[in-house]
Amino acid sequence: MAELAPPTRWSSTQTRSQFAAIAWLRWRITVNSFRRKGGVRELIGSISLYVRLVFLLASLAGGAGIAAYYFAGNGQLAHTSWLLWGIFVLCQLLNIQLGQPGTTFDPTQLIRFPLRVDTYVAIRLFFGLLTPANIVGTLMSFAIAIGIAVAIPSLTLYALLALAVFAATNVLFSRMVFAWVDRWLSTRRAREVFTSLVFAISLGVQWANFSFNPAYNHLHTHGISPQHIHLVTTFYHRVHPLLAALPPELTNSALLAIHRAATSSFFAYTLACALFATLFFAVFALRMRTEFRGESLSDAANGVSRKAVKLPITNLTPAPIAPTHLPSADSSTFAVPPVIVTMLGKELLYVRRHTGILYGLIMPIFLVLIFAGKFAARSNSVWIFPAAVAYTLLAIAPLSYNSFGLEAAGSQFYFLAPIRLRDILLAKNIFGFLMVFVEVLAIFAIITYLSGIPALQTAAATLLWAAGTLAINNIFGNRRSFTAPKKINPHRAATKQTSPVSAFISLGVLALSYGLAAGLFFLCLWIHQQWALVPISMLFAATCVGLYINSLRSIDQFARGHREELFAELCKQN
């Protein structure tokens, strides 16, 4: 850290030195992270992710620019507000789905050094600027400005200025919201309320999409009556005065004003949007100032403030302790090892308190509830149950690639306790199987109620295939849990579950399994020998389970060889 000794008067040169030192530190940590064991794979995964993001950015920005050009060229500049609202909503959804960027070190550790609060606020602001959502929103905003400039060249400078202010406002709003969301979710009760709210909104959007989207209703708007349209229109006209005072509408009003040559109105609307940006930055700075003063958002820190309950002492004589008899493996013909039972209970507790896992469990059931009724009467409804099970695996299978992410530094005790790591991983994998089993039972019941009992051969083959897919997926997941762990902080919003490479491996395993299963499925349907799916799936499941059991035999030695990688990630402070 540059300039550790506090001077009598702080200068701008010393502030620039601090920024340069922090930037150099972050760069060196990032570069060195790719030099460790497995770093090359992480680099390849990051490059692949960036390539996909480039295509996403190009498509979204190109579409926004073309739409803006069309609106401006056809005298419909007012419709640009649709694009601006789309950018605003898209950025927030991407921030929720993709999360905030992971930092190579905890920025809150910088408060140990002689920083000023304004310097710390600037550092925390710039640390979160390069999120995919912010990049997408900024490029789409400038694409809209370019589209308007090409259609109406006289508005080039004004469009660039208005959209630049809008992009900055959008970025500052995201930074402000996520800074305060972490504060609001610092207690378990708040996280439970937030989880319920996210569930309600997400499920409501999915229901509205599948209920009113003509693409899912044979190109007919079933259920949309003139009364519904009238209600929506009335509601829009009532809330429009409130929407007109928000940044997307202010930016659109500024563009309309300059198109009418009303320069003063343009600058007034642009200034109003800039005031929103200033307000968002002020609220963000207020949160960072509290963080600069050393506030802790952990459950342990919040628990300190609770008042201790004093219990009356009624008897100082200790009661006699009754002898306990621990069950042994020889006391019964069949007994589940206590380690596995304990781990299953702990995993259940983690699932109950984690928003992302709960969302992944509920969403497939809800979508099946919607889809099954719509496709029940179609001739290709035979694939509904296999497709629903395959979608369920997408949410549960990646969890095994970061089995110790929620346990953080507590993972060290697995290496100190007199237990085998294979039992720990076996318990975690069994819990994953149980989650899939519960999901499949719910899906089977829903499909049976809405469209009839699925064919016995199809159901049996699907279950066997799912068991084999999970087994082969856990082989890679168990090892990636040690070589590429990722610490998950339940107090932080939108935390990623696995590393990029682990996500690619999981998707690759599932894609290969899906392709193999789909090819065999349609081949058996084509030759009218659907019964052949059962023995083929049975062979596939037996082979995968055998490979999985064999992999567990060497997992203890593998874990000991990679425990330093595990501890380096999970024991760090963040």
Image (cartoon, rainbow, N blue to C red):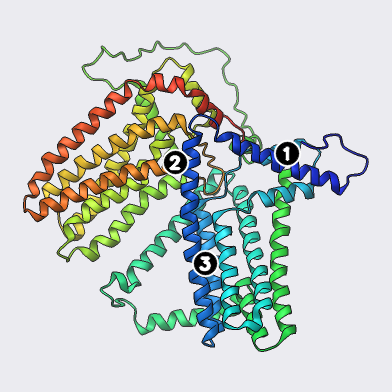
The number of callouts visible is 3
- The three-letter code of the residue at mark 3 reads Ala
The answer to which quarter of the image holds residue 512 is top left
Residue shown at the point (68%, 61%) measured from the top left: 280
* One can see residue 573 in this view: yes
Per the model, the C-alpha gap separating discs 1 and 2 is 30 Å
Q: Secondary structure at mark 3?
A: helix
Q: Position of residue 95 (x, y in %)?
A: 53, 55
Per the model, the C-alpha gap separating discs 3 and 2 is 27 Å
Task: Give the crowd class for mark 2: few <14, some 14-19, many >=20 residues within 10 Å.
Answer: many
Residue shown at the point (13%, 52%) measured from the top left: 523
Q: Identify the residue position indicated by label 2 in the image.
A: 501
Task: Give the crowd class for mark 3: few <14, some 14-19, many >=20 residues within 10 Å.
Answer: many
Up-down: is 565 above or below 457? Answer: above
Q: Identify the residue position indicated by label 1 in the image.
A: 110
Q: Earlier in the sequence, mark 3 or mark 2?
A: 3
